[in-house]
Amino acid sequence: MDDRNDTPFGDSGEPTQVPPEELLQEIVFGPSASEVEAARKIFREGLVPSAQSIAHLAQFSKNDRIRLEASKYVVERNLGKVAEKMAMGDVWEKLFSDIAATKE
C-alpha cells in the first residue's frame, strides 16, 4: 500500500507544500487584469450566440415552461418589467401633473 500523500495538506491539516507564487497572487489579489480582459472577451464573443439561443428557445422550445421563461426574459430585456413600468408610470404621471399644475 502506498502511504504517499498527493494533497498539499498533511494528516494534521497543515500545508506540506507552498502553493506556486501565481496561485498565491490570485488568492490574495484576484485574477490579473489580463485574465479579466480575456474573460470579458470570451463573454463578448458569446453574447450574440447566447441571445440567439434564448430567442430560439422562446420561439421553438417544445417545453411550455422554457418557452414562457425565455419569452419573459426577451420581453423584460427590451421593455422592462411590466409591473415596475406601471408603478413608475403612476409616479411619473403624478410628478408631471404636479409640475404642470404649479406652472399655471
Image (cartoon, grey):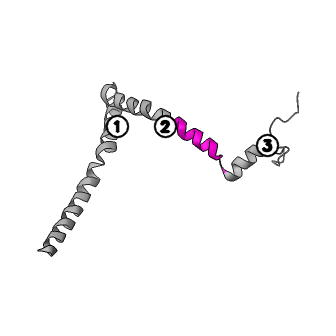
- Residue drawn at x 85%, y 44% is 16
Q: The N terminus appears in which quarter of the rendering?
A: top right
Give the foreground label among 2 and 3. 2
- Residue drawn at x 54%, y 37% is 41
Q: Quick one: 93 or 61, which is closer to the camera?
A: 93
What stretch of residues is rendered in magenta?
30-43
- Residue 28 in the image: above or below residue 55: below
Q: Could you tell me which secondary element the residue under label 3 belongs to?
A: loop
Q: Is residue 60 left or right of residue 103?
A: right
- The image position of residue 43, as x and y in percent, is 51, 37
Tell me the residue that label 2 is attached to: 44
Instruction: Report if residue 36 lies within the magenta region.
Output: yes
- The image position of residue 25, as x and y in percent, is 73, 49
Tell me the residue that label 3 is attached to: 20
Q: Say whether disc 2 or disc 3 marks the residue closer to the N-terminus.
A: 3
- The image position of residue 68, as x and y in percent, is 31, 35
Tell me the residue that label 1 is attached to: 69
Alpha carbon distance from label 2 to label 3: 31 Å
Residue 47 falls in which quadrant of the image?
top left
Q: Amino acid at mark 3?
A: Pro
- Residue drawn at x 70%, y 49% is 27
Q: Could you tell me which secondary element the residue under label 2 belongs to?
A: helix
The crowd level at tag 1 (other Cα within 10 Å; few <14, some 14-19, many 20+) is some
